[in-house]
Amino acid sequence: MQSTKSEIVFGFHSVESVIRNDPINILQLMVEKNRHDKRIKQLIDYAESQGISVEYLKKTDLQKQADSNKTQGVAIRYKASGKIEGKSLEDIMQKENVLLLILDGVTDPHNLGACLRTADAAGVDAVIVPKDRAAGITSTARKVACGAAETMPFFQVTNLARTLKQLSENEVWIVGTAGEAENTLYEIKLTGKLALIMGAEEKGMRRLTRESCDQLVKMPMAGQVESLNVSVATGVCLFEAVRQRKLV
């Protein structure tokens, strides 16, 4: 059942992506009065062609609605379902050479948004997160994702350990990232049906998640810092998988 709760989505890339991909759930487009450029005009014309009402606001009023001074002159009221319509996770995991990204307890919406953007760029088939103690798709995550939040299949699961068991039963190889792993990212195979797990910002993967992994890997760290930001680490890991898959 789709949620009736609305949220404010702002920033040009995010707004444009929602209007193009899910116009039926947009309640209103809000535009800064002084925006008269070609880009905003095209967006307004398309919104009106989809039956979306447009409200013109002062810059300060628009920023107040969005609770941000980084609106780029545009925002929408959006009745988001929080889930991309289409294939179920069960269907997706059947795909040959499926590539999944699992975020175990990532709580910062900025990091989630960045991970979604990277996942989209790397051709990930779906992103999976636990429902509890983890960030969901918010206006902040949407803004950082630059449109990927509206196109990337995103699943919030009640029991991550159970989902990982289901992946294993469908012959998906599960690789988790951990600083104490023996092998580095560049020493293992990342082709075939693969689920890559990134741990939380501070604590890494939870115990049950770690125990569900087929293999643990680490990134070689040559400097003084012990770890990377989770969104940066996600990019490094995913694009190593992309590199390997192109060679097969």
Image (cartoon, grey):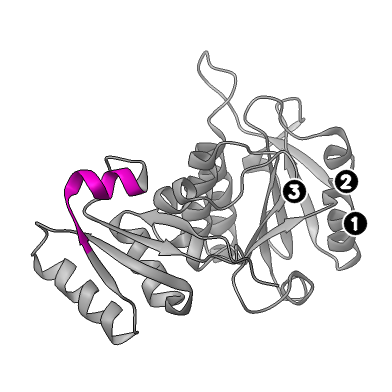
Report crowding for label 2: few under 14, some 14 to 19, many 20 or more residues within 10 A (C-alpha).
Answer: some
Please name the residue that numbered disc 2 is placed on: 212
Q: Is residue 201 visible?
A: yes
Q: Are marks 2 and 3 in contact (CB under 8 Å)?
A: no
| Residue nearest the observer in this picture, 59 or 242 | 59
Q: Identify the secondary structure beneath mark 3.
A: strand
- Stretch in magenta: 56-65
Q: Residue at x 56, y 24 (%)?
A: 221
Distance in Å between CA atoms under marks 2 and 1: 7 Å
**Which part of the image, by quadrant, shows the N terminus?**
bottom right
Task: Give the image location of residue 148, x and y in percent.
Answer: 46, 61
Task: Give the image location of residue 76, x and y in percent.
Answer: 36, 62
Q: Residue at x 76, y 25 (%)?
A: 180
Q: Are marks 2 and 1 in contact (CB under 8 Å)?
A: yes
Q: Residue at x 21, y 80 (%)?
A: 45
Q: Is residue 110 magenta?
A: no
Which of pointers 3 and 1 indicates the residue nearer the eye?
3
**Which part of the image, by quadrant, shows the C terminus?**
bottom right
> Given the image, on which type of amino acid does mark 2 rest?
Ser
Vertical placement of 47 versus 29: above or below?
below
Which numbered marker is on residue 165? Answer: 1
Circle nearer the N terminus (2, 1):
1
| Residue nearest the observer in this picture, 237 or 199 | 199
Which numbered marker is on residue 130? Answer: 3
Q: Identify the secondary structure beneath mark 2.
A: loop
Which of pointers 2 and 3 indicates the residue nearer the eye?
3
Task: Give the image location of residue 224, x and y in percent.
Answer: 52, 13
Task: Give the image location of residue 135, x and y in percent.
Answer: 62, 43
- In which quarter of the view is residue 165 placed? bottom right
Q: Residue at x 74, y 69 (%)?
A: 89
Report crowding for label 1: few under 14, some 14 to 19, many 20 or more residues within 10 A (C-alpha).
Answer: some
Circle nearer the N terminus (2, 3):
3
